[in-house]
Amino acid sequence: MSAHVPPALEVRGITKRFPGVLANDHVSFTLRQGEIHALLGENGAGKTTLMNIIYGLYRPDEGDIYVRGRRVEIHSPNDAIRLGIGMVHQHFMLVPTLTVTENIVLGHEVTRGPLLDRRHARERIQELSRQYGLLVDPDAYVQDISVGHQQRVEIVKALYRQADILILDEPTSVLTPQEAEDLFAVMRSLTAQGKSIIFITHKLKEVLAVADRISVLRAGRLVGTTTPAETDEATLAAMMVGREVVLRVEKAPAQPGEEVLRVEGLRVLDDRGLPAVNGVSLTVRAGEVLGIAGVQGNGQTELVEALTGLRRPESGRILINGRDVTGRPPRLITEAGTAHVPEDRQRDGMVAAYTVADNLVLNTYYKPPFARGLVRDEAQVAQFGRRLVREFDIRTPSIYAQARTLSGGNQQKMIVAREFSRPISLLIASQPTRGIDVGAIEFIHQHIVRLRDQGVAVLLVSAELDEVMALSDRIAVMYRGELIAEMPAEEATREQLGLLMAGVQREEELVHKMGVTSAHAEGENG
Amino acid sequence: MADRVVAETPQPAKPPPGSLLAAWDRVAPATVPFFAVFTALLIGAGIIRFAGASPLVAYRALWEGSFGTPAALANTLVKSTPYIIAGLAVALGFKAGLFNIGAEGQLYAGGVLAVLVGFHPAFAGLPPLLHVPLAVLAGALGGMIWGAIPGILKARTGAHEVINTIMMNFIAIRLTDWLIKSKDPLILLDPSASTPRTPYIAPSAALPRLLDTPLHAGLVLALVLVLGVRWLLYRTTVGFELRTVGANPNAARYAGMNVSRTIVLAMALSGALAGMAGAGEVLGGQGYLSPDFFAGIGFDSIAVALLARSSPVGMIPAGILWGALLNGAGLMQIRADLSIDLIKIVQALIIMFVAADQIVRWLYRIRVAPPTEEAVFSRGWGR
């Protein structure tokens, strides 16, 4: 990069205070022209606040922003877009019932008289698509396309608005490993053609794989900026958390006992009435962790919902400690000794408007000592809340704080505290560490292992291969509603699991399958 | 995006109960309604001016007519009573995430059963200590049935309660009309009356008067119900379930609560409250029921619930304000020569400002409070 080119974006001494918290504390950082700059930090470290300031959603209390060497005031996202700043949010801002083209031009419609100039817009989109290797189908409806495709649409949308600086907020959290690779290729292609990218993430491997430079935020402050060549995962984790982090989970060999969960030939439909789980059978014994790996959307959600009573199975049997609980309501399954860490914590696992204390008794509120008859015992609830906040290190100003004010990691700790603190024989944990910071992940992993060692049967469902490999004693891979393979964890390799997750069976089977498929195809053609 | 902003934007914690901050927390929710009323009265003054009268004279008359004398105060409280109780009914629905627009119909359903128990010979000769509670409970039962029907429809089929409570209103109002006017068969009509109405209730069914004024025990009933609903919502497991279903039905299901049953229960309780409001009016006021007897009390109670922000205790000032505006309007009309409808305009403005609280916050620089459970009343529309 030539020294004469001004940085694409520079912030100097940005400070932002929220009541009671310093979200950004004199943060300065520079995005060079044509680089991928990763911004790493735990939830609550101030990454999103900083990006919202750059995107004009917040006004900084102090500090200046420079775009291409010129000092600017950004009062709204419209100002940001005018300055060539585009943001791809973690949750996509697309209208499902409109086509890709319509979504991209939304708000920047090219018109001919009163009519939308669809043809012109379509051509522009195809041009952008070709130029950066961003495959999008301009005529598809957004509701019909995959998550990875939707993300490309978001990026094209930003480029269509002539963004030179792209902010990607946790872009890989919704992608398969393969899709993530594709995204990285697109990112490299974008920077090769002069765009600059801020890549927000908490995944250390990705940062090392794709970033040119890495800045780490902790508690609102910029801890430092480095490059992938100068650092490694452990150093980055320590920078994020402020202390050494155990990236590997220490655990003794499992000592499986009685069978706790038995599932036989389970079939479950999804919301649209299509088969999502196609004849899954599995067992989990006391004192062992069965990990289910798989790309999201292969029926894991429906499987867990059926096991926890939230979704009625079509057929098959579910037995917990020998008792048939197929199709029984969630409360009965909970009372049978099951804990459930749900996949979507904010949707299912907590009531955002409730206090931490009330959330901690969300599924035990009706039992002594929290209630006598129909009357709640507030003192007991508060006492229990204080104890769990202490034991599980939930960072909250008070047990009376609304759960929504907690960071994602602390919300998850709150849910884990609730589920792990009652006597259970079965734990069903779905994506237990999704979107939370390294410190909280470490903490939750340790607790899962502790429960296993105490003789709890654990069913772990996770899209994070590292997590499944680190915690499981046995690993099963779910693909298109079926468990297509199961193996002892020590025999599993990343590569093999990755292939299985993509639906490719073991090599010998692969050859066999291909033979079958081609014969089948010929048969169809003939 | 939105939830990430929230996740990284720490908000002040709820202070422990009993502290000074907690006291402020209790008052703070009233700031927007207070300024909404203030702004509505200010604009009302402009309209009065425009109509060629003196706002000062008009508002003084309004004050005197509603609170100026002990008799005026007593009348204001009498007028406020049904709004307090029916407001509670609507608020209870809001808490469970349900928009019960059917208070009007539930008032009629309650009124019909209450008046029936009040005048029917089968109940004649009961001592007041039995007859009064029986008639009030009959009212609660009527409202409960009327509220439970849309509740069951929602729980079983997902039919939206807004549509079905409105429909139940039409049915209740027209049904009451027929029950009272029908001569063949003669059902509720008092044939000796000059205008269509039911017979008078037995004196043993009348709510006792208080202090030799128009005040009747309906006011006591209202206060008891305020405390009862508050206790139910915040101190019982049933209330916890109700509020959880309102605040996050997914989490309620996850936590093992029976969402369908809770919806039916909430609508039934809401209806029962509205039914008691109807019974209170019949048994404490005229002592009979006539077509159009409630004349929109049930609809106005939605406004009262909004003004009180669904707080049970807040229903007392909100209901009294509503009663006062209605009661003082008469004197204002005489003194300032203004149409009584002006009060309707002021009431409408109050509700608009409460609903569009952004305007009030902007006008008076009131800081945005963190969203609370109460903010859910409009959710579920078109879901």
Image (cartoon, coloured by chain):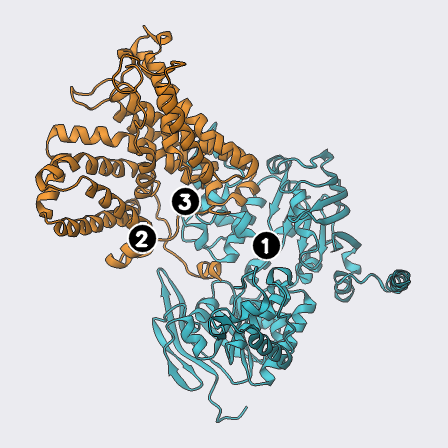
Chain colours: A cyan, B orange
Q: Quadrant of residue A150?
A: bottom right
Residue that badge 3 annotates: B377
Across and down, in percent, residue A382 comes to: 43, 41
Decide if residue A455 is on the left or right side of residue A95.
Answer: right
On the rendered structure, is B125 left or right of A331?
A: left
> Label 2, on which residue?
B357
- Give the spatial CA distance, label 2 vs label 1: 42 Å
What's the residue type where badge 3 is placed? Answer: Phe
Q: In this view, does B192 lie above or below B237?
A: above
Mark number for residue B50? none
- Looking at the rendered structure, the kind of residue marked 1 is Ile
How far from the left and from the top, in percent, is residue B237?
A: 47, 33
- Chain under label 2? B
Q: In this view, does B55 lie to the left or right of B317?
A: left
Foreground: disc 1 or disc 3? 3
Marks 2 and 1 share the same chain: no
Callout 1: chain = A
The image position of residue A322, as x and y in percent, is 74, 35
Which amino acid type is shown beneath numbered disc 2? Asp
Task: Give the structural element (helix, strand or loop) at label 1.
Answer: helix
Q: Which residue is under mark 1?
A: A444
